[in-house]
Amino acid sequence: MEGEELNQQLLDLIKGLEQEGLVDDKFRLCHSLKEVSSPFFFAELIPTFLTDVRTVVRDMTMALDQSVVNYPDLYEHCIKLRGSATCIGACRLKMACSNLRQAIDNKSKVGCLLALNDIKHEYCSLQSKWDTVVQLGLLKELMIRKCNGIRSVYFTEAYVFQQFCFYEAPSPTPTPGLNQPNEELLNRNNASK
């Protein structure tokens, strides 16, 4: 498969994500921000974003596991995550953060737990699809460089292999609360039945 075909496949994938409502035009803009000195900017941006989301979700999960919720700290985490989601174009994740902010404003622990579960769901929806975007982006850059005979540290097969092998995919042991339903909500739902 040639670089142009991979590029079209990547653009089609991004268009599909836009049509699903997972991302907005800012995601496409981030894709176009590749610089000559860093053609892998986009492929490096996504794993960084996903790692940051996992960290913030873990911190929010731990905050909500406390008997007394520190709403100002939770608010700071929410604003950080919403800002990051806005910048990269993860519009459904951004909306889930807005719902969390409302629950924080209402000082509703149950509302916060529900909104956090929505954030976790949106993260999981994005993560697998964005992994494909990263892989296509790396392959596309490699093919373009190979076709043009460009050799440098950024464009070697070894670099792309390193990106695939050391790409920080979610660990087999889940981040506390990220891929697990909230026990308190499950117990509350089971008790109401």
Image (cartoon, helix red, strand yellow):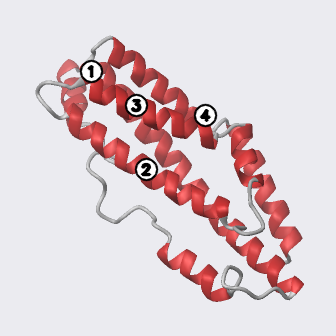
Residue 159 makes an appearance in the image: yes
The answer to which quarter of the image holds residue 112 is top left
Left or right of 149, for residue 51 = left
- Closer-to-camera residue (149/113): 149
Number of residues whose C-alpha sits closer than 10 Å to that of mark 3, classed few (under 14), some (14–19) or many (20 or more): many
Number of residues whose C-alpha sits closer than 10 Å to that of mark 1, classed few (under 14), some (14–19) or many (20 or more): some
- Closer-to-camera residue (18/83): 83
Q: Nearer the viewer, mark 4 or mark 1?
A: 4
Residue 113 makes an appearance in the image: no
Q: Contact (CB < 8 A) between labels 1 and 3?
A: no
Earlier in the chain: of badge 2 and badge 4, it is 2
Left or right of 11, for residue 155 = left
Q: Nearer the viewer, mark 3 or mark 4?
A: 3
- x, y percent for residue 149: 85, 88
Quarter holding the C terminus?
top left
- Residue found 66% across the figure and 40% down from its top: 23
- Residue found 80% across the figure and 55% down from its top: 11
Per the image, label 2 sits on a secondary structure element best described as helix
Identify which amino acid the numbered label 2 is placed on.
Answer: Asp
Identify which amino acid the numbered label 3 is placed on.
Answer: Cys
Q: Tell me the residue that label 1 is attached to.
A: 110
Q: Tell me the residue that label 4 is attached to.
A: 91
